[in-house]
Amino acid sequence: MEKENKPFPYEDILHLPHPVSARHRPMPIADRAAQFAPFAALTGYGDVIDETGRLTDKKPVLNEDAKALLDRKLAALLAASVYEPLCEITYFAADDRKDGGSLRQARGVIKAVDRVGRRLIMTDKREILLDDIIAIDAGLFATAEEQ
């Protein structure tokens, strides 16, 4: 069987110049590329996966001895508040989106304790719930703990 020599179907227009519109400006290359961007059928699905994969910790539970020690340290800091002692407070911050949270540290000077709202107010206006405090450290305690 012999092949037939058919002419190329678009041979008549193959070598013509590229048409340019007299009415419309050419589309910018960035806009042309956007036409071919991948389509996300499940908008927000990636965010849900990322959120699910984000880890949180459980709130540590302190025994009565640890709570009593925190109360004594807080009382000592408040008694020495005229000297504005610098302290470091480790506290549990609950996560807004899921169960659990993370341990955070705040350095600064305690301004006041709101006993009704059960929160500690720092001079930089940060507020820490008393029930969320895990540890308190200050230079004030170094001499008492070394003995």
Image (cartoon, rainbow, N blue to C red):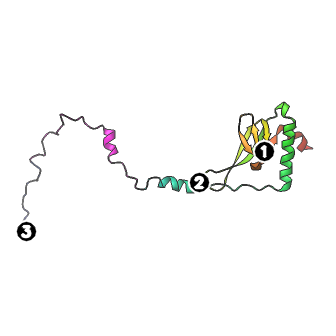
Depth order, front residue of 8/141: 141
Instruction: Give the residue at mark 2.
Output: 54
Judged left or right of residue 19, residue 123 is right
Question: Which residue lies under the disc numbered 1?
Answer: 116
Asked whether 99 falls inside the magenta stretch, the response is no
Task: Name the residue type under label 3.
Answer: Met
Q: Between tags 3 and 1, which lies in front?
A: 1
Q: Position of residue 38 (x, y in %)?
A: 37, 51
Q: Determine the residue positioned at 86% across, 42% down.
A: 75
In the image, 82: left or right of 13? right
Residue 1 in the image, given as x and y percentages of width and height = 7, 68
Query: In what element is the residue under mark 3?
Result: loop
Label 2 close to label 3 by CB (< 8 Å): no
Task: Give above or below for 117 relative to 53.
Answer: above
| Separation (CA) of disc 2 from disc 1 | 34 Å
- In magenta segment, residue 34: yes
Mark on residue 1? Answer: 3
Sequence order check, earlier mark of 2 and 3? 3
Disc 2 residue type (three-letter): Arg
- The stretch of residues the image draws in magenta is 12-41
Q: Residues within 10 Å of mark 3 (few under 14, many from 20)?
A: few
**Whole-percent x and y of residue 12?**
8, 47
